[in-house]
Image (cartoon, rainbow, N blue to C red):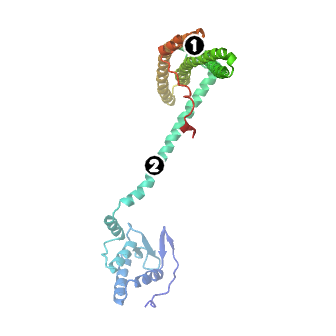
């Protein structure tokens, strides 16, 4: 069937980016493929006639073309690819006007497409989100680096006496007083804890001594009364000592709250204020340096940006300075109130204990709403020990 195909040169090449094939090679490529779709000679002859008509038609610049270097000439040998596709579609029973693109589009419309949309859009959305996060982190790192550099430069300038700093004499004096007061109160707290530990050991010793006296009073008839008196005295001292320990523990707990919570919170605000002051002076020095230089267009833009940063740091500095002033005022009032109550409790409890006035000691604890823990409350229960 294919014996009449002329055997010509089968070399091919490229002309202006277009594939150049000989006519024999086109036949060798096309005819075996066509033989799959047509079983009779009549259809094959019709196809060859259509193929010749297409080959003599003009080129289509809008479509990819196959150029045959051995047929007719350059213009007549250009075969539009879509024409061959239309002929194949015609032989299959599909109208020639319906191209592969149209068929694919129609098939896509008939099929449900949400899954295709998500599979194509999700990677791009994820890539954009990742890129946005990376840009945001980079901007944050850039701002932090610039701010750290300026603050470090300002700090060294102040240390070596080359830069100026903003000073609030009244506020800094109050801060110095607070730090000194905190140091002294920490010393009071340390000594009060030492007193509690020593007094607790003494109470435990008195309790053990009272139990020993009571045991000997039962085993020594000739000294029963003397051991009995001492046993009762030690038990009474132990009871009053536990009451005094309750008052001292309440005193220690209140001082601890005042020093390590109230004062520490104020000092944290002061630390934030000092950092804001350093940043404010750093941006102020930067603005002054730019203002003292030449005033060209580029410098004016930088001065305007530095002015905005300066205003932001100034507002932050003034806000924190106001917060520190308010907290120092409330701290002083709270400190006086707390210490007045705790010092009065400590004095009355110590005086009543060493005076042997049990009633006054108990009245002092009721006056200041001090609740004593029952004996053995610090020990874990049998459920917790399991």
Q: Residue at x 31, y 71 (%)?
A: 98
Front one among 8 and 101: 101
Where does the image place residue 249, in percent across and percent down from the top left?
56, 20
Q: Secondary structure at mark 2?
A: helix
| 128 to the left or right of 208 | left
Front one among 178 and 29: 178
Where does the image place residue 7, in percent across and percent down from the top left?
50, 86
Measure how far apart labels 2 and 1 are at the Cα level.
Answer: 55 Å
* Above or below, comparing residue 84 to residue 148 in the picture: below
Where does the image place residue 265, in percent across and percent down from the top left?
52, 23
Q: Secondary structure at mark 1?
A: helix
- Residue count near mark 1 (Cα–Cα under 10 Å), binned few <14, some 14–19, many ≥20: few
Badge 2 or badge 1: first in the primary sequence: 2
Q: Which mark is residue 131?
A: none
* Above or below, comparing residue 286 to residue 30 in the picture: above
* Total numbered labels placed on residues in the image: 2
From the image, which quarter does the N terminus lie in?
bottom left
| 105 to the left or right of 269 | left
Q: Which mark is residue 177?
A: 1
**Figure quadrant of residue 201:** top right
Residue labelled with disc 2? 128
Where does the image place residue 92, in percent across and percent down from the top left?
34, 79
């Amino acid at each position: 069937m294919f014996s009449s195909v002329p055997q010509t040169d089968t070399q091919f090449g490229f002309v202006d980016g277009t594939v150049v094939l000989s006519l024999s090679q086109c036949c060798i490529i096309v005819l075996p493929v066509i033989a799959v779709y047509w079983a009779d000679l009549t259809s094959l002859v019709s196809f060859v006639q259509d193929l010749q008509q297409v080959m003599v038609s003009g080129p289509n610049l809008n479509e990819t073309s196959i150029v045959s270097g051995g047929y007719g000439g350059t213009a007549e040998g250009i075969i539009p690819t879509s024409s061959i596709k239309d002929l194949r579609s015609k032989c299959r029973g599909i109208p020639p006007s319906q191209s592969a693109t149209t068929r694919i589009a129609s098939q896509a419309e008939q099929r449900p497409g949400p899954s295709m949309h998500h599979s194509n859009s999700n990677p791009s959305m994820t890539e954009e989100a990742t890129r946005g996060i990376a840009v945001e982190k980079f901007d944050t790192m850039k701002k932090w680096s610039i701010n750290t550099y300026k603050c470090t430069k300002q700090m060294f300038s102040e240390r070596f006496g080359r830069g100026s700093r903003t000073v609030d004499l009244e506020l800094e004096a109050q801060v110095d007083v607070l730090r000194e007061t905190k140091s002294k109160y920490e010393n009071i707290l340390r000594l009060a804890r030492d007193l509690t530990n020593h007094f607790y050991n003494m109470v435990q010793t008195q309790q053990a001594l009272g139990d020993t006296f009571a045991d000997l009073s039962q085993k020594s008839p000739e000294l029963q009364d003397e051991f009995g008196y001492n046993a009762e005295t030690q038990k009474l001292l132990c009871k009053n000592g536990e009451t005094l320990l309750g008052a001292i523990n309440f005193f220690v707990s209140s001082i601890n709250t005042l020093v390590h919570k109230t004062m520490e919170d104020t000092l944290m605000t002061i630390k934030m204020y000092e950092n804001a002051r350093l940043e404010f002076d750093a941006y102020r020095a930067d603005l002054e340096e730019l203002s003292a230089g030449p005033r060209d267009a580029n410098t004016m833009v930088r001065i305007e940006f530095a002015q905005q940063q300066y205003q932001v740091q100034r507002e932050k500095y003034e806000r924190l300075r106001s917060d520190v002033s308010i907290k120092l005022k409330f701290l002083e009032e709270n400190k006086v109130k707390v210490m007045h109550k705790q010092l009065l409790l400590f004095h009355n409890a110590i005086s009543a204990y060493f005076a042997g006035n049990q009633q006054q000691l108990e009245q002092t604890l009721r006056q200041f709403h001090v609740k004593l823990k029952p004996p053995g409350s610090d020990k874990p229960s049998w459920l917790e020990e399991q």
